[in-house]
Image: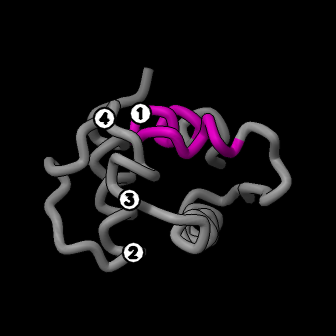
Amino acid sequence: MNSPDLQNQVAQLIIDTLNLDIEVLDIKPEDYLFGEGLGLDSIDALELAMAITNIYGFQLRADDANNKNIFRSLNSLTDYIQINRQ
């Protein structure tokens, strides 16, 4: 389970990295980040992965079979960051 502070940081990272015109509270923890949720695409995922690498000190690999689950929602992304950050 992730902390609310980290979850808010990750939501802000998504907003800032992708230049979204929304607020942190607009990203619900369980909403999908792609498709029907925020509507992100593969280019957004790449940009977000680079930002995560720069800020949290670990690399998300494009060929990771778990990427769909990692980027599923704010909760899943925050959980993954919490486990892997350095």
Residue 61 shown left or right of residue 8 in the figure: right
The residue segment tinted magenta is 67-80
Residue 18: image tag? 2
In the image shown, does 63 or 53 lie closer to the viewer?
63
Q: Is residue 67 left or right of residue 70?
A: right
| SS at circle 1 | helix
Q: Residue visible at 24% across and 39% down?
A: 28
- Residue 31 among magenta residues: no
Disc 4 to disc 1: CB gap under 8 Å? yes
Q: Relative to residue 83, is residue 68 depicted above or below?
A: below
Q: Secondary structure at mark 4?
A: loop
Residue 83 image offset from top left, x and y in percent: 62, 33
Tell which of 43 and 50 is nearer to you. Answer: 43
Residue type at numbered disc 3 = Gly
Mark 2: which amino acid?
Leu
- Mark 2 or mark 3, which has the lower sequence index? 2
Nearer the N terminus, badge 4 or badge 1?
4
